[in-house]
Amino acid sequence: MLKALGCVAERNVAEVQAVMRDFFQRDSLEAVSRAELVERLKEGAVTVLDVRPESEFALGHVPGAINVPIEQLERRLAELPIGREIVAYCRGHYRVMSFEAVAALRKKGY
């Protein structure tokens, strides 16, 4: 029921829509399609960073992905390659954790 109420609010409340637009358009993130990600992985051009909790990662993930839950990202940055494109992903419709991960990585020079 809460999810349904949230959907109604998103569609019908102008304030919620404005907040959503401001949050998700705050950065010029490049969306990467599944096909593009597969191609980049084949070329060895990217590192895939899965920021979901370890329990979700264990249930299934992109082959070759590195699991660093968002709350551990700051202290585990040394595990990520420097000078290589990183594609962050997570679960959910809004992908909030991946947005947070990209912001944190950019702050640190990735």
Image: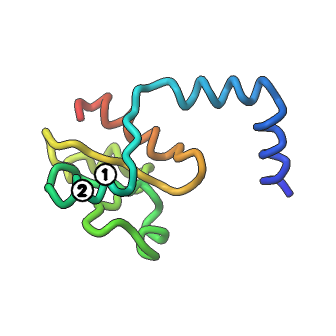
Query: Which residue extends farthest front?
Result: 35
Q: Residue at x 49, y 46 (%)?
A: 97
Q: Residue at x 21, y 53 (%)?
A: 79
Q: What amino acid is at disc 1?
A: Glu
Depth check: give the residue in front, 81 or 32. 32
Q: Residues within 10 Å of mark 2 (few under 14, many from 20)?
A: few
**The label number, if any, that marks residue 36 in the structure image:** 1
Q: Quadrant of residue 110?
A: top left
**In this picture, is 107 found above or below 92?**
above
Q: Residues within 10 Å of mark 1 (few under 14, many from 20)?
A: few
Q: Where is residue 56 drawn, in percent x and y?
A: 48, 69
Q: Is residue 78 left or right of residue 63?
A: left
Q: Where is residue 44 drawn, in percent x and y?
A: 14, 55
Q: Secondary structure at mark 1?
A: helix
Number of numbered markers: 2
Q: Where is residue 42 drawn, in percent x and y?
A: 18, 60
Q: Residue at x 23, y 30 (%)?
A: 109
Residue position marked by numbered label 2 in the rendering = 39
Q: Quadrant of residue 62?
A: bottom left
Question: Are the residues tagged 2 and 1 within 8 Å (C-beta)?
Answer: yes
Q: Where is residue 78 drawn, in percent x and y?
A: 19, 48
Q: Residue at x 29, y 69 (%)?
A: 63
Q: What amino acid is at disc 2?
A: Glu
What distance separates the C-alpha of mark 2 from that of mark 1?
5 Å
Q: Secondary structure at mark 2?
A: helix
